[in-house]
Image: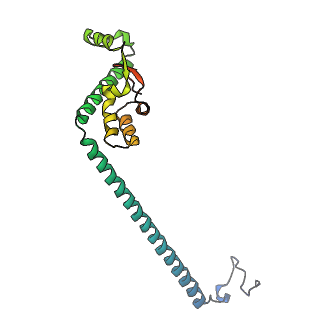
Amino acid sequence: MMGDYSIPIIEPTIDYTKVPPINQKRTITFINHFIVHTVTFLNKFALTCEERLFEFENKLQRVQASLEILESRLSSIPGLETERKTTQDENQKQEVKLVEIVREGTNESDIEVPKEIKNEEKELQPESQPISADPRYQKYFKMLQFGVPKPAVKLKMQQEGLDSSLIDNPQQLVPIGSNTES
């Protein structure tokens, strides 16, 4: 039983003594060719990956340098750090109060509010002012005056829990003491 290429058809009862040997030189040539092309491909792939990683690292360093410059500009604005801390403290207090309300399953009317806070809320509500005069937003308008890019200022406002769209219209009227946070 011989096939088209004078190689016997392999059957379970084949006698391996009658099968002709495989040409070793040809097999070694195929293996060497495969190894050479595989190594060449892997070397090119590794080089391409290293180049891209190097480019990405350079871009990352430029972004980091820009961020440090921006942070130094922001830190040079007087009073910005203290305003940021007080805003964060107020936000944390409001979050704690909301969590307590949700956990206890009570209405906000069930919680006793000190008389001082109620009086302050009543005094602040009736009047309105431009957003640029609001103490919570003044520092952001100062940042714009000092040359900080508007997208960076908006990002900072969002990080502190304020509505960043208000920076686009400085003459928009808001009630004094109202929460325009989003």
Residue 64 coordinates in the image, percent (x, y) = 33, 53
**Residue in the picture at 67% in, 84% down:** 15
Report the number of numbered marks: 0
For the C terminus, give its image quadrant.
top left
Q: Is residue 94 above or below residue 23?
A: above
Colouring rule applied to residues: rainbow
Q: Using the image as rendered, state which of residue 26 and residue 170 is in the foreground.
A: 170
Q: Using the image as rendered, state which of residue 50 and residue 154 is in the foreground.
A: 154
Would residue 112 appear left or right of 38 to someone viewing this image? Answer: left
Q: In this view, does 6 lie above or below 94?
A: below
**Residue in the picture at 48% in, 73% down:** 44
Residue 51 figure quarter: bottom left
Residue 103 coordinates in the image, percent (x, y) = 37, 20
For the N terminus, give its image quadrant.
bottom right
Residue 121 coordinates in the image, percent (x, y) = 32, 13
Residue 149 figure quarter: top left
Residue 131 coordinates in the image, percent (x, y) = 37, 26
Would residue 70 appear left or right of 9 to someone viewing this image? Answer: left
Q: Is residue 122 above or below residue 11?
A: above
Residue 56 figure quarter: bottom left
Q: Using the image as rendered, state which of residue 5 and residue 42 is in the foreground.
A: 42
